[in-house]
Image (cartoon, rainbow, N blue to C red):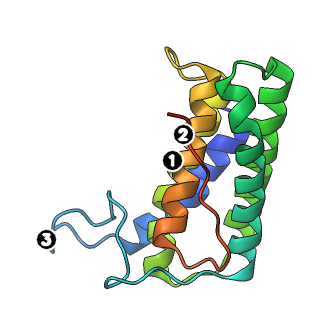
Amino acid sequence: MKSPILLLLTGVLVFPLLLQAEPANHDHGASAPHKIELNAGMKWATDEVLRKGMTAIRTLVGAALPAAHAGKLTPVQYDALAHDVNAQLTYIVQNCKLDPKADAQLHIIIGDIAKGVETIQGKQPGKGRPLGVLEVSRAMNTYGEYFSHPGWQVIKLPH
């Protein structure tokens, strides 16, 4: 059973993409991006809401990653991390206002974060909860590669 917040986020994220979809008889390949890309070689613009939410998520997972990698996070700590990341995703989705093309690219990253959160929650069969922290960390690093966020710091991933 999927969490209500994930279902809400999925609906909020998918609906705008459906509105942007081209008619079936006008095919340029996929109507929504499946692979993240730069904006004509440049990073996508961000707004204050997005920067605030992503900074909070980066702080959360950056602090949790070493302990998760070392096997030292408890189930309660994983649950709290998932809750806090979901709260930031909700804040971003409800308040962030980007250009439609930048927004579509952001949805790819938010989808990756949401999948990582499901793994953190222990809802992905065959995937340990520490892997979810790593998945969210990777998504945050991807965000920093593709979105203009002054002062952004890459999360150092374990080897």
Q: Which mark is residue 157?
A: none
* First-in-chain label (1 vs 2): 1
* Picture layout, residue 23 above or below residue 98: above
Q: Identify residue type, mark 2.
A: Glu
* First-in-chain label (2 vs 3): 3
Q: Which mark is residue 25?
A: 3
Check disc 2 and report the residue beneath it.
135
Residue 110 in sight:
no
* Picture layout, residue 99 above or below residue 11: below
Q: CA distance from mark 3 to mark 1?
A: 30 Å
Q: Secondary structure at mark 3?
A: loop
Which residue lies at the image location 71% right of the left edge and 47% below the top edge?
62
Q: Identify residue type, mark 1.
A: Asp
- Which of the 4 image quadrants contains residue 23? bottom left
Query: Residue 55 at x, y = what percent?
Result: 73, 63
Which dot, 2 or 3, sits closer to the camera? 2
- Left or right, 142 with reference to 75: left
Query: Residue 36 at x, y = what percent?
Result: 37, 63
Q: Identify residue type, mark 3.
A: Asn
Which residue lies at the image location 54% right of the left edge and 66% below the top edge?
144
* First-in-chain label (3 vs 1): 3
Q: Which mark is residue 112?
A: 1
